[in-house]
Amino acid sequence: MGSSEPTRIMVAVSESTIKGYPHASISSRGAFDWTIEKIVRSNTSGFKLLIIHVQVPDEDGFDDTNRIYASPEDFRNMRHGDKVRGICLLEYFVNKCHEIGIACEAWIKKGDPKEVVCREVQRTHPDLLVVGSRGLGPFQRVFVGTVSEFCMKHAECPVVTIKRRADETPEDPVDD
């Protein structure tokens, strides 16, 4: 193999459904930490992390239903606010990469996370995709669906799913 190119690992991250932005979800932090501890270890120059966050617009496209929109400026501010919240989430992971000295790139996309992550895998060609998993049972998966399960079937690269530790699982396992 002899290539001096670093191994590129895409890590899909999301915000916490419990705490909201800018907090990372339990499974995202778990996937990121596992990647650093078990794959990168001390070989930081041998890897580059590609960190993607996909923002999910509500069905009607509005994320904030408690606001009054009275001018075009209100809508620009709303879109700006979504972007800022996503940037704060990515900042957490980028800062961690810089603390340990690993190269990274991070970006935000909008849409259905499972489809967008697979499309970004196709576009960027990482060597590996790491995603967190809430460890939902079959009944919960029917209603919630899982990004990790979809990516395992459809991503055009090897996929590792990192299940939450039992001691990190909230009372409602759908929460993250």
Image: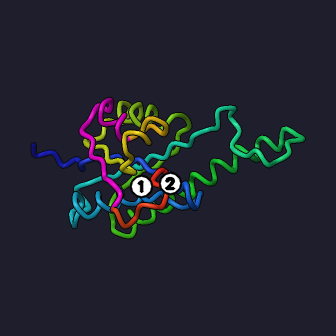
Q: Give the SS element for disc 1.
A: helix
Earlier residue among tags 1 and 2:
1
In the image, residue 98 sits, relative to residue 55, either above or below, namely below
Q: Tell me, for residue 156, which label it has, or none.
A: none
First to last magenta residue range: 148-165
In the drawing, does residue 26 fall left or right of residue 100? right
Residue 142 screen position, x and y as percent: 44, 35
Please name the amino acid that badge 1 sits on: Ser
Residue at 26 percent across and 64 percent down: it is 37
- Horizontally, residue 4 falls left or right of residue 13, namely left
Residue carrying label 1: 28
Q: Position of residue 43 (x, y in %)?
A: 21, 62
Q: Residue at x 32, y 29 (%)?
A: 154
Residue positioned 38% across, 54% down in the render: 104
Q: Is residue 159 magenta?
A: yes
Q: Is residue 137 above or below residue 151?
A: below
In this rendering, would 141 be left or right of 58? Answer: left
63 sits left or right of 20 in the view: right
Amino acid tagged 2: Asp
Q: Which residue is mark 2?
A: 175
Q: Position of residue 83 (x, y in %)?
A: 63, 48
Q: Nearer the viewer, residue 74 or 159?
A: 159
Mark 2: few, some, or many residues within 10 Å (few <14, many ≥20)? Answer: some
Q: Secondary structure at mark 2?
A: loop
Q: Marks 1 and 2, how far apart in space?
A: 12 Å
Residue extending furthest right? Answer: 70
> x and y percent of residue 81 in the render?
69, 50
Farthest bottom residue? 99
Residue at the limit of the structure toward the left, as seen here = 1
Could you say which is closer to the camera, residue 168 or residue 139?
Answer: 139
Q: Quarter-wise, where is residue 93 in the image?
A: bottom left
